[in-house]
Image: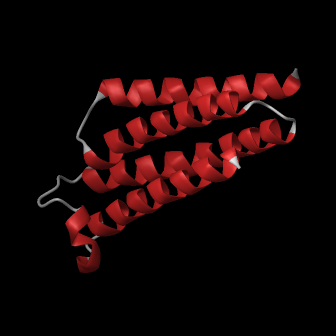
């Protein structure tokens, strides 16, 4: 059930990032996600933030699922899932809602890749 929790939370985050992209494309129904005047790179950055989540989340969720099926402890699963979620929130927020934040960008990627690597290694043990 731990994997299901992180799947649901990441799906909600994906919807938020999707709304941001839709808003920046000019859809008036989602204008509340556009936050007024944006520069020309805002849409590109929002698309990148959205796309990176769709690239990394499926693999992490598969790793969590297989670790859970192998009987990994809930603490380990929540540690990996929560850290991955934090990394994706940091990175997605940086790209979709900010002009620049190297701390969020690099920190988010470090957390994301560390969780993927640790999850993969744990499955191999």
- As drawn, the residue found furthest toward the left would be 37
Question: For this view, does 100 lie left or right of residue 16?
Answer: left
Residue 68 percent coordinates (x, y): 79, 39
- As drawn, the residue found furthest toward the bottom would be 29
Whether residue 116 is visible: no
Q: Is residue 55 above or below residue 121?
A: below
Place residue 56 in its image quadrant. top right
The residue under the point 21% across, 67% down is: 32
Residue 39 percent coordinates (x, y): 17, 52
Question: For this view, does 76 lie left or right of residue 99?
Answer: right
The residue under the point 21% across, 54% down is: 40
Whether residue 32 is visible: yes
Residue 27 percent coordinates (x, y): 28, 76
The residue under the point 61% across, 50% down is: 5
Residue 6 percent coordinates (x, y): 59, 47
Place residue 11 in its image quadrant. bottom right
The residue under the point 79% across, 24% down is: 122
Q: Is residue 88 above or below residue 118?
A: below
């Amino acid at each position: 059930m731990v994997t299901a929790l992180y799947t649901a939370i990441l799906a909600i985050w994906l919807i938020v990032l999707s709304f941001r992209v839709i808003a920046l494309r000019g859809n008036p129904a989602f204008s509340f996600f556009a936050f007024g005047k944006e520069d020309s790179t805002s849409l590109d950055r929002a698309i990148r933030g959205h796309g990176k989540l769709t690239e990394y989340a499926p693999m992490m969720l598969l790793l969590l699922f297989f670790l859970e099926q192998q009987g990994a402890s809930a603490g380990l699963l929540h540690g990996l899932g929560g850290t991955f979620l934090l990394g994706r929130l940091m990175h997605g927020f940086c790209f979709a809602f900010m002009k620049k934040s190297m701390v969020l960008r690099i920190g988010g990627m470090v957390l994301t890749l560390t969780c993927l690597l640790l999850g993969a290694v744990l499955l191999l043990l």
